[in-house]
Amino acid sequence: MNELDQLYQQVILDHSKRRIGSPLVEPETGHRHGESHQHNPICGDQIRVRVELEGEQFTAMSWEGDGCSISMASASVLSEMLPELTREQFLDKLDLFREMMRSKGTMTPDEEVLEDAVAFAGVSKFPARVKCAMLAWVAAEVAMLEAA
Amino acid sequence: MTGQTEAAEALTANEVARIKADFEILEHQVNGADMVYLDSGATSQKPRCVYEAEQHYYENANAAVHRGAHTLAVEATDIFEQGRETVAKFIGAKTNELVWTSNATEALNLISYSMSNASLGRGGDAAARFRLGPGDEILTTELEHHANLIPWQELAFRTGATLRYVPIAEDGSLRYDLIDSLVTERTKLVAFTHVSNVLGTITDTRRFVDAARRVGALTVLDGCQSVPHLPVDVKALDVDFMAFSGHKMLGPTGIGGLYGREELLNAMPPFLTGGSMITVVDMEHAEYLPAPQRFEAGTQRISQVHGLATAASYLDEIGMQRIADWEEHLGALLYEGLSALEGVRVFGPVDAKRIGTVPFEVIGVHPHDVGQFLDSRGIAVRVGHHCAQPLHRALGVTATTRASTYLYNTEDDVKALIEAVASVREYFGV
């Protein structure tokens, strides 16, 4: 597979079109929720992420955004994963995801932990695109902290 | 003025190939493909003679200019001032009407801050023309690069003046019909671009200059995208100020210029102050040198000036009119070729006069993804808002992909781009 195809894996292209978790939905009454708007000034990409929690457990993530296939697919993949996770599990995955993104293509990610998000490993070879992949994850973290 | 006095015979493909060979970097491969550089609107590549000139300066003449009596200092000063003469001539200015700056952004900020200083009373009555206050207006346009917008926003904030702008129509053309109603007795400054850095369209500068002259407003032209690509004569354009940058016209980074009419530059209070711009200094105050030195505080960019002057001579030798004609030809090929592709939308008015700069969108594919795909084929373009967010907002998009040519681009470069863009949608499955 050439580098471009490693970057644009089928999983990413599919998710960028399906956009799981988009558009935003109103939080369920009684659930704690938080929201974050993140913006990449370099390309103008932006995303608004809303998360809901019951105790330590995420129950939902929804989002609205405008951006490249990498940033939109990353939000979609995360939306699918997040409702299964506790705060701690999410933070562990975030650490690993961030480490993978900073690895410049040298890290073989743990598929057990990162699930579909391993598809973004190829992005780490393109430093200009790392922010695109991180945007939704950063927004989800800030939204989580806001919900606390 | 260059080019126009010669018989402007068209550049031939062979000649362009010879020109291209002067640019070492264009012989490189990118991602396994021959490099196709279509991002000269962001920065141009440099011919060998430009960086060799810089190297020659450091090997043979490096010293601080306008100070010291030793031989090297004299040689360095000669090179520095010879460079000013060459570049001033290149834009049709008198030698003392060209102020060196780091880039066009600094040139525009120089005017903005000098006017602030005048508004605080600096420069006395001689600087009255540069004073702004509540009730005064600054006029710019919706086309502008942020560098010709934000300095005026800040100037308005600092002085209490109001910033107004000439809007664009849906197709990106300037609403010239509104200029006469927007320029009033309150207007003190009119700042506008010569060529849009996004759309590549050439402004009818006469419309702005005539309106400004009618009310005695100062005119500031952003020449960043015109000086590299068109024959530019500031006297024929009849503007008061013009900013331009060296790195977009084959010169090094870190050097730009501000043209100002002699009597204006000599009346305007300085922006950056310090060494090399004074006559007499005591502990309470200082007297300033006439322009251009009054605006050139601190040790100057000597090797960059030499590099830029070498670049201007290189362009002059080929002839700016011939370069302009070649790029108009490439621009038309780009505009027509991209417009003909299914699922591709080209921005900018159809019938406009333009340089070889064309922005477009591939429907359903984000510009960043388009740029990434093109890069995998060795093609360099710019993606994003190109430092012109208000323009993009007016066009109804957040970002575009922009191809921009220069004298070293060939018809094959344009063909390679169009062929690659044609397969973008298939790759991304839209």
Image (spheres, rainbow, N blue to C red):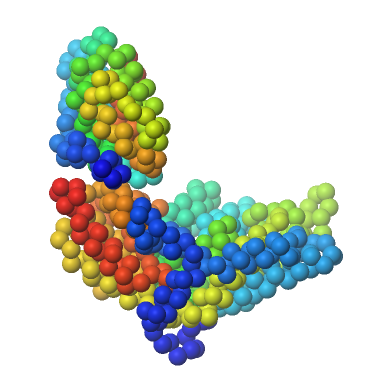
- Classify residue B204 as left or right of residue B109: left
User: In the image, what residue occupies the spot 20% across and 66% down?
Assistant: B339
Work out whether residue A63 or residue B380 is closer to the camera in this orientation and state it: B380
At x 32%, y 38%, the residue is: A123
Residue B20 image point, x, y percent = 44, 71
Residue B305 visible in rendering: no
Give the number of marks.
Answer: 0
Instruction: Name the side, left or right, on which B290 lies relative to B45.
Output: right
Relative to A4, say whether B199 is above or below.
below
Residue B71, horizontal then vertical, whole percent: 82, 67
A42 left or right, relative to B151: left
- Residue at image location 25% in from the left, 59% down from the top: B420
- The answer to whether A106 is drawn above or below residue B390 in the figure is above
- Residue at coordinates 46% horizontally, 52% vertically from top-left? B150
Quarter residue B177 falls in: bottom left
Q: Is residue B1 visible?
A: yes
Residue B36 locus on image (x, y percent): 36, 62
Query: In this picture, is B372 found above or below B339?
Result: above
The answer to which image quadrant residue A121 occupies is top left
Nearer to me, A98 or A72: A98
